[in-house]
Image: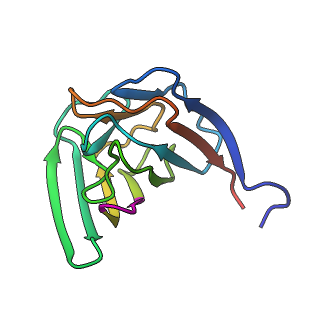
């Protein structure tokens, strides 16, 4: 493993105003992997989503498993216009949600892109997911979205890290 810090902060956004979309753009291809960490909540109970490079086509699929403390669930979706990144680990006005999303080989231009994620909301549940963006383009932009009538709350923090090759 390489000496020094593994995670290099690329950008952090701490929301000073409520918004329904947070965007990281002009993402350099100089890392091997990306990690996005979200700590915050929303104005209402709502799922959150991702899109890459402004792609609104039906190119997203996901498989997830979740637990609520009393039950376990799993499902999958395909041919979606955005990647659903939570089912029970969703943000809400009352509880801070923590999400960690990993993007291995995000700049590779010969394979589809995968996303590995986990979310936790102490009041709702926890989950793990794998997502697929059916594109061989390098990820240069990540949009994190809420449903149109819901916003990420003031003080929510989004940090994007680059991981260098070991």
Magenta residue span: 117-124
- Judging from the image, the colouring scheme is rainbow
Q: Quadrant of the C terminus?
A: bottom right
Q: How many marks?
A: 0
120 drawn magenta: yes
In screen coordinates, is 58 left or right of 119? left
User: Which of 97 and 113 lies nearest the eye of the viewer?
Assistant: 97
Q: Residue at x 73, y 56 (%)?
A: 6
User: Which of 155 and 6 lies nearest the eye of the viewer?
Assistant: 155
Q: Percent position (x, y) of residue 104? A: 50, 55
Relative to 149, residue 158 above or below: below
Q: Residue at x 46, y 20 (%)?
A: 17
Q: Quadrant of residue 1?
A: bottom right
Q: Quadrant of residue 153?
A: top left
104 drawn magenta: no
Quick one: which residue is furthest to the front in this view?
A: 94
Relative to 150, residue 78 above or below: below
In screen coordinates, is 70 left or right of 99? left
Q: Percent position (x, y) of residue 35? A: 55, 50
Quick one: which residue is furthest to the top in this view?
A: 17
Q: Residue at x 45, y 30 (%)?
A: 141
**Magenta portion: prevailing SS class:** strand
Q: Percent position (x, y) of residue 147? A: 22, 33
Relative to 163, residue 20 above or below: above
In screen coordinates, is 50 left or right of 61? right
Q: Percent position (x, y) of residue 107? A: 51, 43
């Amino acid at each position: 493993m390489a000496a020094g810090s593994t995670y290099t902060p690329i950008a952090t956004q701490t929301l000073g105003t409520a918004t329904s979309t947070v965007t990281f753009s002009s993402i350099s291809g100089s890392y091997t992997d990306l990690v996005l960490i979200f700590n915050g909540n929303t104005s209402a109970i709502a799922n959150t989503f991702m899109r890459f490079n402004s792609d609104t086509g039906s190119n997203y699929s996901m498989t997830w498993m979740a637990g609520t403390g009393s039950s376990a669930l799993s499902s999958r979706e395909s041919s979606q216009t955005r990647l659903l990144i939570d089912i029970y680990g969703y943000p809400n006005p009352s509880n801070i949600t923590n999400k960690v999303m990993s993007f291995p080989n995000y700049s590779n231009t010969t394979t589809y892109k995968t996303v590995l994620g986990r979310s936790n909301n102490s009041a709702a549940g926890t989950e793990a997911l794998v997502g697929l963006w059916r594109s061989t383009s390098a990820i240069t932009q990540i949009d994190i979205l809420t449903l149109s009538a819901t916003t990420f709350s003031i003080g929510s923090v989004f940090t994007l890290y680059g991981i260098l090759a070991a």
